[in-house]
């Protein structure tokens, strides 16, 4: 009987781990598709539209980390060479820190090829369109 119980535990553990692994793979699918979703500049929050305008003006930016290289480790944006993407903070009213909202742009700093908005700290992106 103890052997049957051990086998059940092993099988249960295997099924749980398989389910978890499948769930993680599934969770990446929709987030990756968000890079194809769009948002217009007019749909951005006031703070987002201000940040977008500042990017095209070359600043000045409120945060020291604005303009730093974004590594795209999440692989949700189109693959490019390191240094292609830069991130900028979108102010969150009432937040004591930088918050979760960002705009990530690829290409030359003042004339980017494309910009993406994330409201959830890189878990999903929407391409900014005019």
Image (tube, helix red, strand yellow):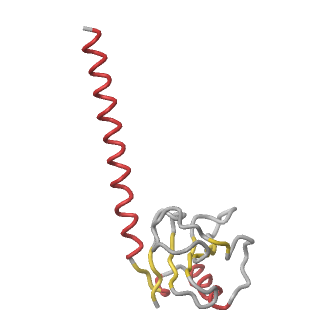
Establish if 80 lies above or below 73: below
Residue 59 in the image, given as x and y percentages of width and height: 71, 85
Residue 44 in the image, given as x and y percentages of width and height: 50, 81
Q: How many marks?
A: 0
Establish if 53 lies above or below 1: below
Work out which residue is located at the far top of the displayed protein and give it.
Answer: 1
Question: Closer to the camera, 29 or 47?
Answer: 29
Q: Quadrant of the N terminus?
A: top left
Residue 22 in the image, given as x and y percentages of width and height: 32, 47
Question: Closer to the camera, 20 or 60?
Answer: 20
Question: Closer to the camera, 45 or 23?
Answer: 23
Residue drawn where x is 36% and y is 42% of the image: 20
Residue drawn where x is 36% and y is 45% of the image: 21
Residue 102 found in image quarter = bottom right
Residue drawn where x is 67% and y is 76% of the image: 67
Work out which residue is located at the far front of the displayed protein and give it.
Answer: 81
Residue drawn where x is 75% and y is 71% of the image: 64
Residue 38 found in image quarter = bottom left
Image check: 74 left or right of 96? Answer: left
Image check: 70 left or right of 33? Answer: right
Residue 90 in the image, given as x and y percentages of width and height: 61, 74
């Amino acid at each position: 009987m103890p052997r049957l119980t051990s086998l059940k535990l092993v099988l249960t553990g295997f099924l749980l781990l398989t389910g978890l692994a499948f769930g993680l793979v599934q969770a990446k699918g929709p987030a990756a598709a968000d890079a194809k979703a769009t948002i217009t500049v007019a749909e951005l929050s006031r703070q987002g539209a201000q940040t977008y305008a500042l990017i095209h003006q070359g600043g000045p930016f409120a945060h020291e980390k604005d303009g730093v290289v974004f590594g795209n480790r999440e692989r949700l944006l189109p693959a490019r060479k390191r240094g292609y993407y830069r991130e900028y903070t979108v102010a969150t009213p009432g937040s004591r820190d930088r918050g979760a909202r960002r705009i990530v742009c690829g290409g030359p700093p003042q004339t980017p090829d494309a910009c993406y908005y994330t409201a959830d700290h890189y878990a999903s992106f929407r391409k900014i369109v005019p």
